């Protein structure tokens, strides 16, 4: 038994798996196949889930556009105030969700710093898809930035130098060497950010109650009808998310070949 | 290798510490309506001054508050709702067998200095102001929260009181799928499920609970908000003003019960609620342990201390409080209430 340590870790790890899986399995068990099918037939549930998926998708896309460049800078450059920026990025993870929603409202609401000029142009943020996207982006962006940054940090900067010594521009070196090598981290980061966005309730509910997102719909079903009608929708949402997670995780394994080992 | 055992041990010790944490002090758990937050906070401090107890309060919309007991199986020593009928409808007979009606409230319209037309609005023309282009008003989701369906009742009652049968149509029907019709001498308001409310969000701002809307009013997102007088009054130092409505429509006067009763709200669940004066109800759930502190809290609520706290917070106490099933009431409380 030289690998006693492995058994040992497996036992502890098993407890962790059970801790996470048990409540989820219990949701499915209490809902049953019938409940799941019932939820699938509920047009309002499908709509709410689609609203959540769509807004989370755009939130992740926007986070990619602005977050990945930032992650690269943070991974490669040292500059004064860097640790302050790093702490700011992590703040949304710590702020209570309702507070985050109210903070966003102060900026993006009709009387907010950004909301007022936008409203002049007829752009509506409160109670709109845009509002949901903004709230989701706020709470989920840190995940993407941190994952992408770790990905970039794992790529040896000397690889870029070699490419540049062979005649590549800095841009070309980043695009053809560093980005592909950190693609898996960026991808997993995007997935985590998307998932975090889907699960957000508090911040979204402050800034946009309508269109109804999946969490708001589930809560409203719970208040109106109790668990009997809300648990199936929750199980259905979980079910779709699990399917998406598993398939994307499988798809992302092909990037593993770039990983060092 | 041996040393690694330290990690699971730390884990178990941590868990045990968490379980035993806070258990050296008695706890009194109270679930209550959001609009009772301020007076209950003061009552909590009064009780903690007297007894060696840790009062833990959880507030939410009244429906969510009761669902915690009936659906989630959570335990509380005291449950207080902004609508006493919810205790009867949702908790009887399995989870409760008495209800003390202890305080009243009334509907008002709150606004801030940022609200458009704030200098013109009063208790007689509010529905015209609310209907104006560019004015946004808010109320909570009638499916989720008593303050929400009471807002609809106020607007419907206004039609009868002001003898103007377009008020509900202008404010509500034009901006949502909530409909009202006259049927058998009553006004029946049909509220579709939340996902089918189809609110025109350029006109009406809705959130699950009325407390959620206060932030939107304060930030200027909405101009006017239907809310309980006590809540508006408690926010008077943070720039919230309010107009009082005629008592024929503000659901405050017990002698107008027949007038209010002309309005009924029907929900997609099949539930139907008749407009009644706003009366708060409190009960001890049947599965609560018998604690002296529970009784002490209720005595504090029902005697002069509680009455004073409620008055100071803009809410009217019912003196003496009224109990429906007085025989089920703990005997120490009987002298504080009268039979219905």
Image (spheres, rainbow, N blue to C red):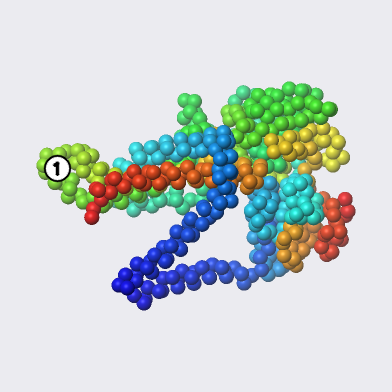
B13 relative to B93, above or below? below
Residue B211 percent location from the top left of the image: 63, 44
A78 relative to A55, above or below? below
Res B201 seen here: yes
Q: Quadrant of the N terminus of chain A?
A: bottom left
Residue B15 percent location from the top left of the image: 51, 68
Q: Is residue B26 left or right of residue A194?
A: right
Q: Quadrant of the C terminus of chain A?
A: bottom left
Q: In this orientation, which residue lies closer to the viewer: A45 or B40?
A: A45
Q: Residue at 32% across / 70% down in the picture? A: A3
Circle 1 chain: A
Residue B251 sits in which quadrant?
top right
In the image as oriented, which residue stretches furthest toward the bottom? B2
In the image as oriented, which residue stretches furthest toward the right? B339
Which residue in the protein does label 1 denote? A164
B321 relative to A233, above or below? below
Q: Residue at 75% across / 38% down in the picture? A: B272
Circle 1 crowding by C-alpha within 10 Å: few under 14, some 14–19, many from 20: some
Q: Residue at 74% across / 66% down in the picture? A: B290
In the image as oriented, which residue stretches furthest toward the front? A33
A105 relative to B319, above or below? above
Q: In this orientation, which residue lies closer to the viewer: B91 or B256?
A: B91
Q: In this orientation, which residue lies closer to the viewer: B287 or A75?
A: B287
Number of dots carrying numbers:
1
Q: Is residue B319 left or right of residue B292?
A: right
Q: In this orientation, which residue lies closer to the viewer: B240 or B306?
A: B306
Residue B156 sits in which quadrant?
top right
Res A210 seen here: no
Residue A228 percent location from the top left of the image: 63, 46
Q: Is residue B74 left or right of residue A164?
A: right
């Amino acid at each position: 038994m030289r690998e006693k340590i492995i058994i040992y870790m497996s036992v502890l790890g098993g407890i962790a798996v059970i801790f996470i899986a048990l409540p989820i399995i219990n949701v499915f068990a209490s809902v049953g196949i019938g409940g799941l099918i019932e939820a699938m037939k509920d047009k309002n549930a499908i709509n709410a889930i689609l609203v959540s998926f769509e807004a989370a998708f755009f939130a992740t896309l926007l986070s990619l556009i602005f977050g990945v460049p930032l992650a690269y800078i943070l991974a490669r450059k040292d500059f004064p105030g860097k640790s302050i920026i790093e702490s700011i990025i992590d703040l949304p993870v710590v702020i209570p969700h309702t507070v985050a929603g109210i903070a966003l409202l102060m900026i993006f609401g009709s009387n907010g710093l950004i909301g007022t000029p936008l409203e002049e142009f007829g752009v509506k943020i409160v109670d709109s898809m845009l509002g949901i996207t903004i709230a989701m982006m706020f709470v989920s962006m840190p995940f993407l930035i941190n994952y992408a940054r770790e990905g970039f940090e794992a790529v040896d900067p000397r690889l870029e130098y070699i490419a540049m010594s062979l005649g590549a521009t800095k841009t070309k070196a980043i695009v053809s060497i560093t980005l592909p090598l950190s693609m898996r981290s960026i991808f997993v980061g995007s997935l985590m950010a998307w998932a975090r966005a889907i699960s957000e309730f508090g911040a979204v509910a402050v800034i946009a109650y309508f269109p109804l997102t999946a969490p708001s719909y589930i809560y409203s079903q719970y208040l109106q009808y109790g668990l009997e009608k809300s648990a199936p929708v929750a199980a259905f949402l979980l079910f779709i998310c699990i399917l998406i997670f598993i398939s994307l995780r499988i798809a992302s394994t092909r990037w593993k070949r770039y990983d060092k080992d | 290798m041996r040393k690694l055992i330290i990690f699971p041990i730390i884990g178990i010790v941590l868990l045990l510490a968490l379980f035993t944490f806070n258990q050296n002090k008695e706890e009194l758990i109270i679930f209550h309506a959001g609009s009772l937050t301020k007076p209950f906070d003061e009552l909590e401090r009064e009780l903690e001054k007297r007894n060696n107890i840790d009062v833990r309060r959880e507030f939410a919309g009244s429906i969510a508050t009761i669902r915690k007991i009936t659906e989630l199986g959570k335990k509380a020593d005291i449950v207080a709702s902004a609508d006493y009928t919810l205790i009867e409808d949702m908790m009887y007979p399995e989870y409760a067998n008495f209800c003390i009606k202890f305080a009243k409230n009334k509907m008002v319209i709150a606004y801030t200095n940022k609200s458009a037309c704030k200098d013109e609005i009063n208790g007689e023309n509010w529905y015209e102001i609310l209907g104006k282009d560019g004015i946004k008003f808010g109320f909570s989701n009638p499916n989720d929260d008593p303050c929400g369906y009471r807002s609809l009742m106020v607007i419907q009652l206004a039609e009868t009181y002001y003898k103007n049968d377009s008020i509900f149509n202008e404010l509500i029907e034009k901006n949502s799928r909530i409909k009202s019709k006259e049927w058998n001498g009553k006004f029946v308001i049909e509220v579709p499920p939340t996902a089918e409310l189809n609110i025109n969000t350029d006109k009406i701002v809705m959130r699950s609970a009325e407390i959620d809307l206060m932030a939107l009013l304060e930030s200027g997102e909405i101009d006017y908000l239907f809310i309980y007088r006590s809540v508006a009054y408690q926010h008077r130092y943070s720039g919230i003003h309010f107009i009082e409505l005629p008592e024929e429509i503000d659901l405050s006067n017990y002698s107008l019960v027949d007038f209010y009763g002309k309005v009924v709200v029907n929900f997609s669940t099949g539930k139907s609620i008749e407009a009644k004066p706003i009366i708060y109800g409190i009960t001890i759930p049947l599965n609560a342990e018998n604690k002296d502190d529970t009784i002490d809290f209720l005595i504090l609520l029902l005697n002069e201390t509680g009455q004073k706290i409620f008055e100071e917070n803009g809410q009217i106490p019912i003196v003496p409080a009224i109990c429906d099933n007085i025989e089920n009431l703990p005997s120490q409380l009987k002298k504080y209430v009268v039979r219905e």
